[in-house]
Image (cartoon, rainbow, N blue to C red):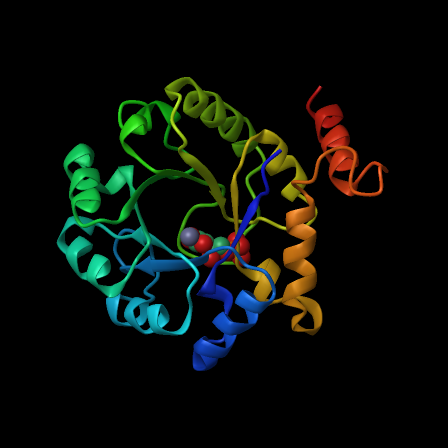
Amino acid sequence: MPKVRIAPSILSSDFAHLADEIAAVEQAGADLVHVDVMDGHFVPNLTIGPPIVEALRKVTTLPLDVHLMMTNPDAFIREFAEAGATYLTVHVEACPHLHRTVQSIKEKGVQAGVTLNPATPLTSVEEILPDVDLLLIMSVNPGFGGQRFIVRVLDKIKQARAMIDRTGRSVLLEVDGGVKVDNAAAIVAAGADILVAGSAIFEAPGHDYRRVIAQLRASGATDSGDNGKPTGHSKAVASSRKARR
Ligand code: DX5
Ligand code: ZN
């Protein structure tokens, strides 16, 4: 099984020491930095914009995974691309001309992602899937960190995995919202490639980011780990399978 990638969401980080926080998660083994852009309109919260992405680009070599929770992302694609975004992910609910939006992201040389809210059916991304680099499944209603994972979304993740596999393309499957050490194995077993985690990492006891990132990553380990013993992952997957029967 390929290694699961971990994307700390800086929404839960200490904004007064953002560069230090990025350095800390990078040293702790993060694979991407997840940047939540909220416009106070599409979601009831207001966060950061292109200048912060530009500032982050200067302090890390990790890919910047920019999640645009905004009503009119088309108006800002150029700015976020120039700021140094690696991935730009837009919400299907906010994009009436999604194909055009995805093409304009790709024309800027940026990896294109699409995402959908928990109540939005997967069929809304079926037609665009062959054109994107990343599919993000929201497992909370977007707007805030620290919310509880919506368990029903596990089935959607499985269906998304199957839908991606049918395209025959390597579209990354990312999950965002309420991801914790104790549910990561089930999310990875459902087919996720990337786990976004905000509060689980940045609010870790003792700020031990390395420990949490390692634990989240271990959720993607195969049944026989390095020592040949069953891992926590396999046990958790087994119990989550049992729970679904
Ligand atoms: C929610 C954001 C998430 C959020 C996740 O609107 O898109 O990226 O930061 O935070 P946790 O991991 O705390 O649910
Ligand atoms: Zn996000």
What residue sits 75% from the left and 24% below the top? 242
What residue sits 13% from the left and 54% below the top? 75
Q: Is residue 45 above or below residue 96?
A: below
Provide residue 69's location: percent of width, then percent of height: 31, 52
Q: Is residue 79 above or below residue 141?
A: below
Q: Is residue 20 above or below residue 153?
A: below
**Count of number-bearing discs:** 0
What residue sits 58% from the left and 68% below the top? 27
Picture quarter with the N terminus: top right
Provide residue 191's location: percent of width, then percent of height: 55, 31
Picture quarter with the C terminus: top right
* Residue 197, picture quadrant: bottom right
Quick one: 158 or 229, which is closer to the camera?
229
What residue sits 42% from the left and 25% below the top? 164
Quick one: 182 or 168, which is closer to the camera?
168
Judge from the rendering whether residue 103 lies leftward or rightward of residue 237; answer left or right: left
Can the viewer see residue 146? no
Provide residue 108's location: percent of width, then percent of height: 18, 50
Can the viewer see residue 12? yes
* Residue 207, picture quadrant: bottom right
Judge from the rendering whether residue 78 lies leftward or rightward of residue 3; answer left or right: left
Provide residue 82's location: percent of width, then percent of height: 20, 62
Judge from the rendering whether residue 207 lies leftward or rightward of residue 91; answer left or right: right
